[in-house]
Image (tube, grey):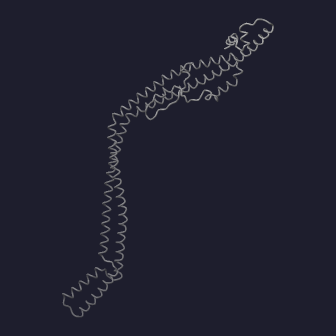
Amino acid sequence: MSEEENTTPKQTEESGTNISTANEQADVPSTEEPTPEEKFSENPEVISLQKKLATMSKTELKDTTITLREEISDTASTIKQLKNKRAEHNSQARHYRQMRNNITDKRFGSIQELREEAAHEKELRDHCNEQIQKLKDRRDELNKLIREAWGVVKELREDYYDLKDEVGMVPEEITQEIRDLEWKQQTTPIPPEEDAELTKRIAELYEKAYAAHSLGVSSDQIEDSVEKAKRLSQEHDEVHEKVLALAEESQEHHKRMIALYEKLDELHSGGSDLHEKYLEARQAADAVHQRIVDLYERIQLNQFIIDLLDDEKARRRFEKIKELKKEKISKTKEKQSSGKKLTLNELRLLMGETDEEMEEETGQDK
């Protein structure tokens, strides 16, 4: 068997996107591989042969050996063809990889520029979204403050009109009437009786004004509360407008970012088809390589079985030589006892050396 037939390839893998010809170089056996005995001792074919080996005829041993050697020869031819096919696939893979890389290299500058622009648009969009979130938080806070402010207005108005029910007049009406009556006393000649009535009325009004003041509700307070609620509402509207404006700006940045990513996809797509072809060629090479590995395994198994057959032949030949030697020694001793002259080979036989004639005789049985 040739040296090539005795080798056992070791399966290898590529790393990353770099194509490797390691599967072409892996046909050298590894020193770490197990021995044939360790590798095939549990093989069903080996076990079956070992069971019937001692009972096989000489012809069966010979025919089986010939069949196995022919199979090894045919397998070696198949391996040679597969190696050529594997080399072809590897060559195609390298070709497609080079074309893919050339496209990528030419477009690398554009890709980097587009990536930077897309990242910038994303940064601007995210900044807008952060501002929007802050404004939304403020808007929610204003909603709460507005509800509270109008609640205060409502309470003040209720208290204001409750005051009218208790006092009979609202503070503004009391103040205005006091001013009118005092002005009349000061500027208009009136009889003493009427003046006394005015004085009494003014005193009553002051008592009502004091009572209204004690309750602590005035139209000024209501107006201040209303103004506060309106200011909050105005700020709420302004914040809401800012949210809408920033949302529109964020959407524009997002659209530009998506458009840039689409351009990036277009640039990448030029090499994607070549990358697919590269992967297909590489996978085809790996598949052929695995087939080669399996065939080498078969060759090694066949050779191991042939070795078992040869060992059996050698054992039988040794047993036959041993038996023939025993018979010749017996005959030689009888010849010596009868006083006959011994030949040189017979003397050697008695001295423990193997008879060359026996070697030749048993050698014919191979």
Above or below for 152 versus 15: below
Please tell me which residue lies in front, 234 or 84: 84
Give residue 316's position: percent from left, percent from top.
70, 18
Residue at image point 29% right, 85% down: 206
Q: Residue furthest right?
A: 338
Residue at image point 55% right, 28% down: 31
- Residue 75 falls left or right of residue 14: right
- Residue 259 falls left or right of residue 284: left
- In which image quadrant can residue 117 be found? top left
Q: Residue furthest bottom?
A: 192
Please tell me which residue lies in front, 68 or 1: 1
Give residue 333's position: percent from left, percent from top.
78, 11
Give residue 349's position: percent from left, percent from top.
72, 12
Figure quadrant of the N terminus = top right
How many marks the image carries: the answer is: 0
Figure quadrant of the C terminus = top right
Residue at image point 43% right, 32% down: 18
Q: Residue furthest top?
A: 341
Please tell me which residue lies in front, 137 or 326: 326
- In which image quadrant can residue 90 be found? top left
- Residue 66 falls left or right of residue 91: right
